[in-house]
Amino acid sequence: MSTRRRSPRPPADHIRANRDDWDRESDAYDRRYRRVLSGPRALAWGLWRVPEARLRLLGPVRGRRILEVGCGAGRWALALRRRGARVVGIDLSRAQLAHARREAGRRPLPLVRGNAERLPFGDARFDTLFADWGAFTFADPVRTIPEAARVLRDGGRLVFATASPLRIVATERRRYRLVRRLIRPYFGLSRVRWGTGIEFHLPYGEWIRLFRSSGFEVEALIETRPDAGARSAYLSAPDDRWARSWPAECLWALRRAPRAAPRARSARRAARSASGRAHR
Ligand SMILES: C[S@@+](CC[C@H](N)C(=O)[O-])C[C@H]1O[C@@H](n2cnc3c(N)ncnc32)[C@H](O)[C@@H]1O
């Protein structure tokens, strides 16, 4: 898969902060979570590792051109390649990509160091984009969602897992614990800082507005609810119990709407300006 050169532009502060954070944390993160991200749990979503075989969000993968956006150690991407997909992984962090290279072993995986807000790929190059708590959590959605729409072919899928906005407004900042009261305003939710890292989370209405204005249709929103007694490797036991009552995580499944043909677009523009003149 060839990549497109993009003119250099200094990265935004959240990109620099997150890149440094992941470079610093990568080894510890990998030691801590590699077990829940490997083997049969490589092809599984989110905090409770719900199998893709159960949710079927990605659709058929054999022969499909798939981009994992914020691929980390690339275990999802490698598992998809074993199922016949043509997968590329992109990630901001050099250290995370080094893990992906090691995981791929003797058969290198196409890996690109880059920022999801400015994807270095041409238009309509992929059938599917996805991220399991990848770049759509850490990069500005106002940039990443239109970029995802640009590099997807018409009818292509975008699937990603991230935090629910409810989780964000009910997370106590200091101890990063879920509580049963609303701590921060829901309206206006966007950039959220946790320690040295920066995430982006939107109210549901804002996500949907952004998806639609970027050319996506929403196929599904799964608000993951863990089974009673299920434990997430990422959460404390009280947080698992919280998530039995309120959604802590969202899995969005979107479809790229067909792009308007250039002739249809200019006809619509002409009709709009003619009707504007008629009303003046
Ligand atoms: C939680 S990891 C997700 C990887 C894997 N799915 C996992 O669960 O370990 C988040 C990844 O997103 C990457 N990332 C953050 N911001 C990004 C951006 N703007 N562009 C590309 N990757 C980004 C980080 O470097 C990190 O590897």
Image: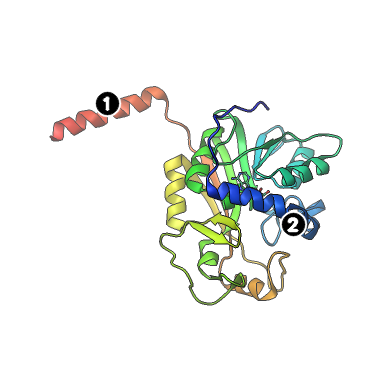
Q: Is mark 1 within 8 Å of ligand 1?
A: no
Q: Quadrant of the N terminus?
A: top right
Mark-to-mark CA distance, 2 and 1: 55 Å
Horizontal and vertical percent position of residue 101: 79, 40
Q: Which callout, 2 or 1, points at the residue further toward the start of the chain?
A: 2
Q: In the rendered view, would you say 73 is above or below 180?
A: above
Residue at the spot 56% in from the left edge and 75% down from the top edge: 179
Crowding near the residue tagged with mark 2, few <14, some 14–19, many ≥20 C-alpha atoms within 10 Å: few
Q: Is residue 169 left or right of residue 98?
A: left
Residue type at mark 1: give it. Ala
**Which one is nearer the viewer's eye here, 257 or 133?**
133
The verdict on label 2 being within 8 Å of ligand 1 is yes
In the rendered image, the quadrant that contains the C terminus is top left
Q: The residue under label 2 is which amino acid type?
A: Tyr
Q: Nearer the viewer, mark 2 or mark 1?
A: 2
x, y percentage for residue 6? 56, 29
Give the colouring mode of the picture.
Answer: rainbow
Tag 1 residue: 270
Q: Position of residue 238 (x, y in %)?
A: 65, 76
Q: Which residue is mark 2?
A: 29
- The residue sitting at 41% across, 62% down in the picture is 187
Q: Which residue is drawn at the image coordinates 80% and 52% (left, top)?
A: 38
Dot 1: few (<14), some (14–19), or many (≥20) neighbours within 10 Å?
Answer: few
- Give above or below for 148 relative to 261: below
Q: How many marks?
A: 2
Residue drawn at (63%, 28%), measured in percent from left and top? 3
- The answer to whether residue 153 is seen in the rendering is no
Give the camera-side residue of 55 and 43.
43
Asked whether 59 or 111 is in front, the reply is 111
Point out the residue furthest to the top here.
Answer: 263
Position of 151 with respect to 269 (left or right) is right
